[in-house]
């Protein structure tokens, strides 16, 4: 029972995430992105995927929890070849305080805030503050990538189970306060042998809406803030994993999308 291993396996799909970042950046800028900062990186799995994609790719991975960074170093960075390890740096820092000075004066092609981690900022002013600090860490043609979730089930108090290899992943929305849109969520795991890991991860955050997020990005100074909505597989009625820039979404029970903001 290693909660970070179970999390990576159940929650993250870094290949698809980096596919989206690579192709969208190239489509917008007409050149490949080479430098990437993964904010709220946890185990830095996404940054490691980035390093493996191209010999000129390099990355910073930022998280304020030294223990999760240590886990990422021991389990993810340790899997890289030596010449790859030289191209990734873990930074134990609050994302609100990371400017280019903390990154050796380097500015980035792409900065990522994934798995809704930035929902931790509850106040509009604080969120804009974070977005502004991202903006100053980007190159002049840099791009900020975020994801978001929503839909009418996002505000429900529910538990959802999903079978994984050898264990069950349980996502719980334990409470939701409609007055301030703040919610308590947990991830629990149960092995097939019945061993429980209750509240392995705990998230207290605000369920922001897409117009709020895009408005805050524009207020922070980004020149664009576009939503990329997932297409539908006609055969299954489920999402097809293809995200395209859209002005109209579908009123799904629950959805996940990307937001792409250009400096
Ligand atoms: C939801 S996990 C995201 C893990 C991974 N990036 C992913 O996409 O699944 C959120 C991470 O953000 C970190 N975190 C939360 N607030 C932070 C802050 N202000 N600065 C840096 N890291 C922060 C936590 O320590 C945790 O590892």
Image: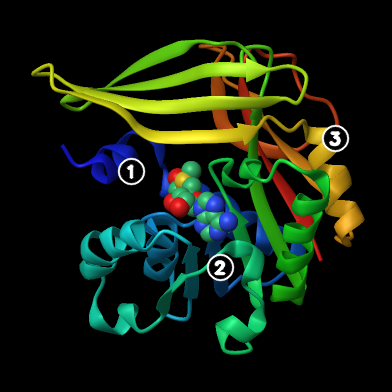
Could you say where residue 262 lies in the image, as x and y percent from the top left? 79, 61
Q: Nearer the viewer, residue 129 or 171?
A: 129
Q: Which of the image's four quarters has the N terminus?
A: top left
* Image point (73%, 51%), residue name: 260
Between the C-alphas of marks 2 and 3, the distance is 25 Å
Q: Quadrant of residue 6?
A: top left
Residue that mark 1 sits on: 8
Mark identifier at residue 37: 2
Q: Nearer the viewer, residue 219 or 183?
A: 183
Element type where label 2 sits in the image: strand
Q: Position of residue 241 (x, y in %)?
A: 54, 33
Tag 1 secondary structure: helix
Ligand 1 under 8 Å from disc 2 Cβ:
no
Q: Is mark 1 within 8 Å of ligand 1?
A: yes
Q: Residue at x 32, y 25 (%)?
A: 188
State the separation of the CA atoms marked 2 and 1.
19 Å
* Color encoding of the figure: rainbow
In the rendered image, which quarter is residue 2 located in? top left
Q: Earlier in the sequence, mark 2 or mark 1?
A: 1
Circle 3 SS class: helix
Mark 2 or mark 3, earlier in chain? 2
Please tell me the numbered disc located at residue 211.
3
| Left or right side of 88 for 238 | right
Q: Tag 3: Cα neighbours inside 10 Å, few (<14), some, or many (≥20)?
A: few
* In this rendering, position of residue 185 left or right of residue 246: left
Residue drawn at x 41%, y 70% as measured from the top left = 51
User: Taking 67 as reference, is 54 left or right?
Assistant: right
Q: Quadrant of the C terminus?
A: bottom right
């Amino acid at each position: 029972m290693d909660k970070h291993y179970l999390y990576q396996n159940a929650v993250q799909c870094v290949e698809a995430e980096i596919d989206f970042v690579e192709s969208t950046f190239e489509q917008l800028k007409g050149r490949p992105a080479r430098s990437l900062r993964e904010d709220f990186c946890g185990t830095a799995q996404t940054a490691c995927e980035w390093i493996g994609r191209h010999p000129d790719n390099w990355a910073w991975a930022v998280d304020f929890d030294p223990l999760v960074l240590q886990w990422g170093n021991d389990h993810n960075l340790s899997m890289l070849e030596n010449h790859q390890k030289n191209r990734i740096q873990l930074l134990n820092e609050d994302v609100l305080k990371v400017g280019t000075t903390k990154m050796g004066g380097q500015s980035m092609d792409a900065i990522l805030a994934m798995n809704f981690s930035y929902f931790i900022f509850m106040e509009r002013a604080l969120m804009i503050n974070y977005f502004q600090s991202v903006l100053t860490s980007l190159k002049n043609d840099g791009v900020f990538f975020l994801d978001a979730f929503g839909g009418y089930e996002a505000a429900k108090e529910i538990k959802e189970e999903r079978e994984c290899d050898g264990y069950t992943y349980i996502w719980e929305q334990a409470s939701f306060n409609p007055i301030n849109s703040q919610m308590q969520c947990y991830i629990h795991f149960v092995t097939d042998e019945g061993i429980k890991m209750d509240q392995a991860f705990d998230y207290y955050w605000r369920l922001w809406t897409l117009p709020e997020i895009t408005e805050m990005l524009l207020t922070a100074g980004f020149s664009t803030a576009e939503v990329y909505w997932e297409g539908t597989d006609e055969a299954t009625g489920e999402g097809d994993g293809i995200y395209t820039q859209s002005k109209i979404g579908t009123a799904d029970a629950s959805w996940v999308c990307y937001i792409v903001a250009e400096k």
